[in-house]
Amino acid sequence: MEQNNSAENRGQVSPPAPLRPTPPHPTQRVPGTQAEAAIVPRRIVRIDETGAVEEEDIVVREAALTVNVNDKELATIVCSPVDLKYMAVGFLCAEGILIKRDDLRRISVDEEQGMAWVETRHQENLGEKVFLKRYITPCCGRARTSFYFAADALLCKPVTASLRVPLATILSLAEQLQQRSRLFQHTGGVHGAALAQGGEILIFREDIGRHNTLDKIYGQCFLEEIPREDKIIVFSGRVSSEILLKIAKMGVPVLISRSAPTDLALQLADDLGVTVVGFARGGRCNLYAHPERILLDGAASDTCR
């Protein structure tokens, strides 16, 4: 009778299979100079059902941007190191430090050092008045209370735009966002957001921070004086209260997300007049707030009346 002298039958554990090295993958597989600036190569060990393979992958970069206003350091933002001028300006808009275009006298950015210097028309450091100061206030005159940053309460006004958007446009924009998210497709490490008009995406930004994607769009709109009352934001991430407040500050009437909203975000959307569309993917979506801006057909329209 033939004996089986394998390591398994002798009660011994077989040594792991050696790593199979593979040639490095060029980082240029994510096209565009901005995308290349947002990633770095890294050797990894990839494991699947066939074994372990050593190969070169790409990971997203994380960098710090320190924003100085009128020669005083205001904040340090962790972000993807691209579109840093838009990042700094959009952040200052969201904080209420920049409101009108002529509030900004000049801005300079050192991308290598991660520094931004901003000079505003008002020489006092406005950030000290509003930045990171919380208080509690009744939400738009209703009985319940909601938390705000001081800047939120000063800047958030109800969005009254009469924009109407066909359902087909909502679903098309959600699909376009997915198709444009090349950096996410290759790394899984970023969020995406877009500013759209009608069925066309005008601005698209990706960043490691979901808030940052909106600030970069806000900053570009501010610098280029792009109106926003007839625009749509398409967003990849969860809609939290902070995200909803950013949308309201921008004055954008419709927010489309591929993900879910929170209850506080929806309370704010109700009060601030922002239409929220969630889970917009795969030809489906949920209308959570102010559905009257979405043009439906047939039975769906009857249901929402």
Image (spheres, helix red, strand yellow):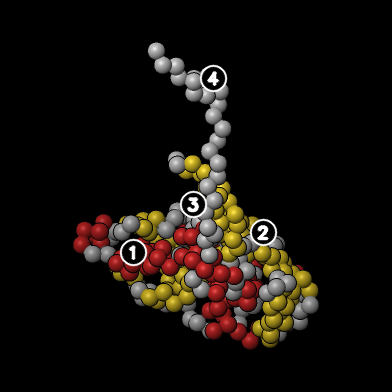
22 on left or right of 114: left
Residue 163 x, y percent position in the rendering: 38, 74
| Location of mark 4 (residue) | 11
Q: Residues within 10 Å of mark 1 (few under 14, many from 20)?
A: some
Question: Which dot marks residue 171?
Answer: 1
Question: Which dot marks residue 135?
Answer: 2
| Location of mark 3 (residue) | 263
| Residue 201 seen in the figure | yes
**Pair 2/4: label in front:** 4
**Pair 1/3: label in front:** 1
- Give the CA separation, mark 2 to mark 4: 67 Å
**Pair 4/1: label in front:** 4
Determine whether the residue tagged by mark 3 lies in a helix, strand or loop: helix
Determine whether the residue tagged by mark 2 lies in a helix, strand or loop: strand
Q: Sequence-wise, which precedes: disc 1 or disc 3?
A: 1
In depth, the one of 191 and 254 nearer the eye is 191
Q: Residues within 10 Å of mark 4 (few under 14, many from 20)?
A: few
Q: Quadrant of the N terminus?
A: top left
Q: Residue at x 46, y 60 (%)?
A: 185
Answer yes or no: do the residues labelled 3 and 4 have beta carbons within 8 Å?
no
Q: Residues within 10 Å of mark 3 (few under 14, many from 20)?
A: few
**In which quarter of the view is residue 141 placed?**
bottom right
**Pair 3/2: label in front:** 3
**Pair 3/4: label in front:** 4
